[in-house]
Amino acid sequence: MKPSVFSATSVQEVEAHLQNASKEGLKPTLAIVFSSVAHDLKAVSVAFAKHDIDVFGASSAGEICNDEFLEESIVAMLLDVSRDTYRLKVFEGREKTSSQIGQNIGEWAKTVYENPALMVMSGGILADGDGILNGIINEMGRQAPLFGGMAGDDLKAHETFVFDGSRITSNGAVALIFDRNVIGLQGVAFSGWKGIGTSKTVTKARGNIVYEINGEPTLDIYRKYLDFGHDPSVEITVVLASQYPLLLNRDDGSSVLRAVVHINDDKSLVYAGSVPEGAKVRFGMAPGPEIIDHVIEQISEFSRQAPRSEAIVLFSCVARHLALGPMVEDEIAAVRKLWDVPLVGFFTYGEIGPVLQGRCDYHNNTLVPVLIYQK
């Protein structure tokens, strides 16, 4: 597999890294790429394509290379794997719901390999990650290893993108499928966010847009119940609201976090995943620095169950960075230390992965390390 990672601050630096890799005798076939929207994403993808390297890429809200957190950068993992062992495809989403995009991915995935493992990334600020996930699972008709993240745009909340070596879209998804008989994927989603306050009822919602909670406009509920809301001069922004996701309780007893990605003029909020009408919710909050110790303890438990890896792709919610500040690097470093292999990742607007001893789900405010290894 021969994984290697690098970071760059320009497309020219990317080209230099790829030229050096060629001089050193490396022959990567696949690049996993995360880039700030500060760069020309088309030029980024073309740089790899010129070297006959397939690209699985997304725009980011912060980049991760080994145990370092970067901003306005480009990071990449190069993999030398047989093209018989993976397939890559961009799915355009124009005039399609998120669920339909997921169904299209699922239709394709079940025809490619008998035993697939998937990574999926979505572009589009208003995309419903929950719809994409359920579309894939329902169409495939069975569970398969499935991980991924929602693209970012440096917290501009304007437009996010996914891309391969020739196409880029702000309204669609890119899917990477491995032949699980040859390449293994394992990962788990960790959060540490705690529910606060009393339970409330979503009284008006459609898909991932919540209009009312407890019969009041959703934005007013945020201002009414959260500490920053008592001062009317404080503007409730997406960045501020995303640090207080909704903790959504499901009928089966499980729960999941939903973060704000857009605030509408009518005081409704758009979340990164579906929030059903009638659902019981509470606000979530990071409890403090101890969250890192808790998550590291959980990841260590996972590492004992999955001790083998040759590379790691890390999907981490941008809200973790906002809540933890510089300490987020401690979390990243702890993940890499457990397996001591090349690591690349990005700060996302939503994450896909299973919880420990649980089903695959769509999350916010989580950290999802994905282990990659050749069997």
Image (cartoon, helix red, strand yellow):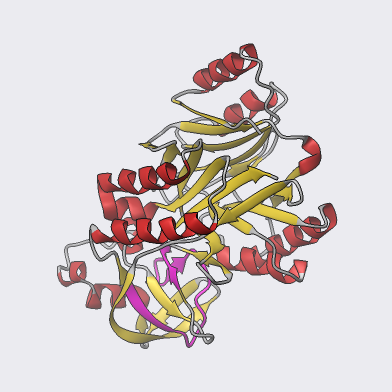
Residue 15 in the image: x percent, y percent? 57, 18
- What stretch of residues is rendered in magenta? 256-283
Nearer to us in this view, 310 or 288:
310
Residue 278 in the image: x percent, y percent? 48, 88
The answer to whether residue 257 is magenta is yes
Nearer to us in this view, 13 or 92:
13
In the rendered view, tell whether residue 260 sits above or below residue 48.
below
Quadrant containing the N terminus in the rendered view: top right
Regarding residue 120, the answer to whether it shows in the image is: no
Q: Looking at the image, which residue is at 50% across and 82% down?
A: 250
Q: Quadrant of residue 23?
A: top right
Q: Quadrant of residue 257?
A: bottom left
Regarding residue 371, the answer to whether it shows in the image is: yes
Residue 63 in the image: x percent, y percent? 43, 39
The answer to whether residue 192 is magenta is no
In the rendered view, tell whether residue 116 sits above or below residue 87.
below
Q: Looking at the image, which residue is at 58% across and 29% down?
A: 44
